Image (cartoon, rainbow, N blue to C red):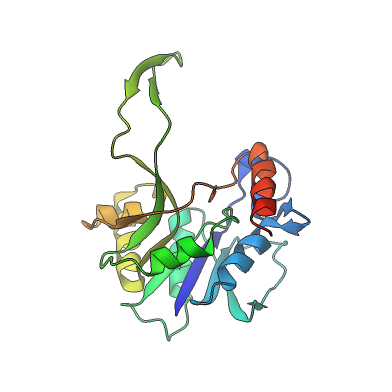
Amino acid sequence: MTWVVVPAAGRGLRAGGDVPKQYRPLLGKPMIEHTLTRLASHPRISGIVVALAPDDPYWPDWYELEGKPILATIGGLQRADSVLAGLRALPDEVRDEDFVLVHDAARPNVRHEDITALLDADAPHGALLAVPLADTLKQADKLQRSARTMPRSGLWRALTPQMFRRGQLIDALRFTFGDHVAITDEAMAIERAGFSPLLVEGAADNIKVTTPQDFLLAEFLLKGQGA
């Protein structure tokens, strides 16, 4: 059985509105409720730790979803701070050598079959869901003109969940703090520590809700998935 850390201390300013994006409604429920329910309903997930902003007035004090424990802890200004806080708040039964998942609060559409594929991956140094890039990539100049076409061979779009051993990820995140590098996902911290996590292909509809338009797409996808 595996625990999940969900960093949810950010405000998601690009999504607009006065309420942090993870609490904005999708199909009549806060987006984070869809996300946590999707995770907790997976039969191999043991529980979830959610890292919140210290002054979060929106958290509904969930202690359980789908029969699984929900723990809350205080996150930080950066994603890495929140993930590290979540890892440290895991129950004592979670050992340093145990795998832990990290999942974005703003990815409510993750599929159970993708979580299963990640958990089943033969990946001693961890793994993450990802999708091979299909779009043509352009590099812009200073005037935002297309300067050249970039090769997309071998490029993937990183998703979550990402899966790493608890102790390994704690050490990798702490190592990056000394470098003053902005860590955009957990795999980046693991890579900087000298390891190469496995890419596990997941569904492209596991989108991260970032802009106002993404809320419409997420609702459409949830309806299609039978949410």
Residue at image x 47%, y 82%? 91
Q: Residue at x 67, y 44 (%)?
A: 215
| Residue 11 makes an appearance in the image | yes
Residue at 53% x, 77% y is 43
Instruction: Determine which quarter of the picture holds residue 110.
Output: bottom right
Left or right, residue 24 beside residue 97: right
Q: Quadrant of the N terminus?
A: bottom left
From where the camera sits, is residue 55 visible? no
As drawn, 106 above or below 82: above
Quarter holding the C terminus? Answer: bottom right
Q: Nearer the viewer, residue 217 or 223?
A: 223
* Residue pictured at 72% horizontal, 42% vertical: 17
49 above or below 9? Answer: below
Whether residue 60 is situated above or below residue 28 in the rendered picture = below
Q: Residue furthest left?
A: 194
Name which quarter of the figure residue 111 lies in: bottom right
Q: Residue 117 appears at what percent x and percent y?
A: 41, 64
Where is residue 204 shown, x and y percent of the image? 49, 46
Q: Which residue of the protein is positioned furthest toward the right in this rendering?
A: 28
How many circles with numbers are drawn on the protein? 0
Left-right relation of 85 to 163: right
Residue 220 image offset from top left, x and y in percent: 68, 46
Q: Position of residue 211 (x, y in %)?
A: 62, 39
